[in-house]
Amino acid sequence: MKKVLTALFIGCWVIGVSYAITMMHSWHYVDLSPSSTEDFKLASILPEVKDHGVVHFLTPKCSCSKSIFEHLNSRGPLGKTVASEVVILIDDDKEEFLKPLKKNGFQVYNYSTAQMKDEFSTSIKGVPLLVIYNKSKDVRYVGGYSDASITPLTQINIKNYLLTLNEGRKIASKPVIGCSVSKEYQAILDPLGLKYKKEN
């Protein structure tokens, strides 16, 4: 009987660990791209632009966002002759991203997860998210920065995206692979609360 209980315990432990590892591994392959651009309500906060504007959605709670944050701080704003650039932060409670970005000349807005849901409905599922809009404030591109998850080695060149749009071509859609900012999606992706801590 003791051997049976031991075998059952080991079996349950192996299954539990395997499930947790599978869940954590799968987070890096889930595409959190918006289902459409129709729900984006960005017009009220976006600066007027001559050709195109760029918006980055990031959160300090996401390692992929941190890579984009470091990239932005390293290069600085694109400059209005290229494109107006805005960074929208989510749950940056300690102003971890906000202060350095502002210091480096970026226009930054900070929202809580609850405010995001009110402002942008359910259109934003995850970050890091890139949005490019035109002078009419119509969204021309919404999606990820790369075909894979973002790392410090990922090559990011927003100017190439802008050049593509200025030539009248479309940017090939890229997945948003990073962290969910939607409580609904967090519950689906991480029912055990391993990645996204459950808040009371």
Image (tube, rainbow, N blue to C red):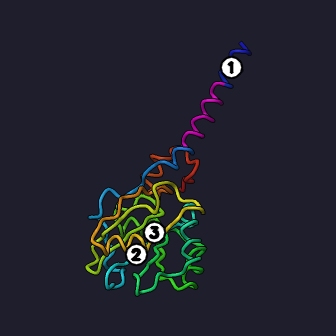
Range of magenta residues: 11-23
What is the tally of numbered marks visible in this picture? 3
Nearer to me, 195 or 68: 68
Nearer to me, 188 or 156: 156
Spatial distance from mark 3 to mark 2, Cα to Cα? 10 Å
**How many neighbours does mark 2 have within 10 angstroms: few (below 14), some (14-19), or many (20 or more)?**
many
Q: Secondary structure at mark 1?
A: helix
* Residue under label 1: 7
Q: Secondary structure at mark 2?
A: strand
Which sits earlier in the primary sequence, circle 1 or circle 3?
1
Nearer to me, 1 or 116: 116
Rendered-image quadrant of the N terminus? top right
**How many neighbours does mark 1 have within 10 angstroms: few (below 14), some (14-19), or many (20 or more)?**
few
Q: Which mark is residue 16?
A: none
Question: What amino acid is labelled 2 in the image?
Answer: Val
Residue drawn at point x = 55 percent, y = 62 percent: 154
Spatial distance from mark 1 to mark 2, Cα to Cα? 57 Å
Q: Residue furthest top?
A: 1
Name above or below for residue 182 compared with residue 71. Answer: above
Residue drawn at point x = 46 percent, y = 49 percent: 30
Residue drawn at point x = 56 percent, y = 71 percent: 71
Question: What amino acid is labelled 1 in the image?
Answer: Ala
Residue 86 lies in quadrant:
bottom left
The stretch drawn in magenta includes residue 19: yes
Question: What amino acid is labelled 3 in the image?
Answer: Phe
* Residue under label 2: 54
